[in-house]
Image (tube, helix red, strand yellow):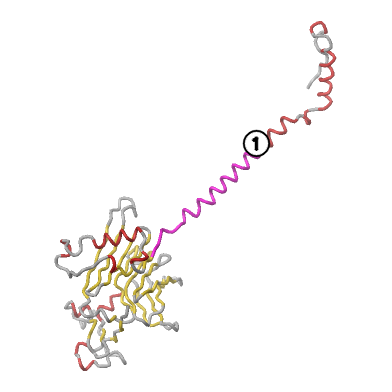
Amino acid sequence: MIVNLEPPAERDLPPGSAARMRGRLRRERDAGPATRRAPATRPARHGRIAVAGLVACAVAGAVAVPLTRERPAATIAMGPGELTPALSSTVEDCLNGYPDGAMFANGPKFPVGGADMAVAVEHGGRATAVFLTGEGYLACQRTGAGIMPGDEPSGGISVERWDGTRGWLPGPVQVLLRTSEEADGGVVTATGRISARVQRLVVEHGDGEVSGARLSGGTFGLLSTAGVGPGAALVAYAGDGTEIWRQPFFEPARSRFECWIDPDGVVVHPAPARRDGTDPSAPDRPVITPEAGDAPHAGEDPAAAGCHPAEAWAP
């Protein structure tokens, strides 16, 4: 507070300065600090900067949250024309070394090229591809490095000759390759062949959710949109919505003891358990018994007893 309004002695000031100083001091005393403009403008300016900073933080937070929840890239390619760069690399890796590599020395061998790729699926660094030729099929799985810390690239391959079965399917659906992130759950993939009756194919997750497959030219590619549970199942539907085929995703073993015949009663898909020498009549294995309509000409071929009708495949 200003108490002494008296300026220094007049002898110490230039002429007229004492009067001007006395007047200025009185005006400041009467006005008070409220009308001082400089202190009022600075806080307002700092306030705007602080608000801008808060908005920037909010925007940055809003952008960051979806990124942490984003699903890995997922792609299904039905044929070579839909291949992504990543899947093109998978196709090359699958065919690398076949059929002359040491690991194929004792297996079936036939020409396979990139143009034979029928279905390829990619999800989060994991990829599968199925190649169909006139002589057989090749199914391949690849997992790239970096999925988990310390991971190395890995994969597997399966090669089979048709042996006269190319034109026939073991029912409406033939699964050639299925994969899962976990032993009985996680994101799953499935690829294979379908008959003309199949107009829709899905995987039931086991929790009420379903994921649909892509169908094209007698083949299908399926990638679940989320993780599935142990009770997941593959289900096929006809054009009118009727369910025509169902198979547990993680327990397809029953098909090892089933066989399929063409309309003439000839076994075109023998039961794998019979084909590899396993006795399907053993007590710990199911025994196939004839059902109405299952074997219209079973009497012509003893091996056809209890077999199911095969379905034609027309790509």
Q: Is residue 69 magenta?
A: yes
Quarter of the image where one finds residue 267: bottom left
The residue located at (82%, 20%) in the rendering is 24
Majority SS type along the magenta span: helix
Q: Residues within 10 Å of mark 1 (few under 14, many from 20)?
A: few
**What is the span of residues highlighted in magenta in the rendered image?**
48-75
Residue 66 coordinates in the image, percent (x, y): 50, 55
Q: Is residue 219 magenta?
A: no
Q: Quadrant of the C terminus?
A: bottom left
Residue position for label 1: 46
The residue located at (83%, 16%) in the rendering is 20
In the displayed structure, would residue 82 be above or below residue 274?
above
Residue 27 in the figure: left or right of residue 212: right
In the displayed structure, would residue 256 be above or below residue 79?
below
Quarter of the image where one finds residue 255: bottom left
Q: Hey, which residue is sitting farthest top in the picture?
A: 11
Identified by mark 1, the residue type is His
Q: Quadrant of the N terminus?
A: top right
The residue located at (26%, 59%) in the rendering is 93
Residue 252 coordinates in the image, percent (x, y): 30, 75
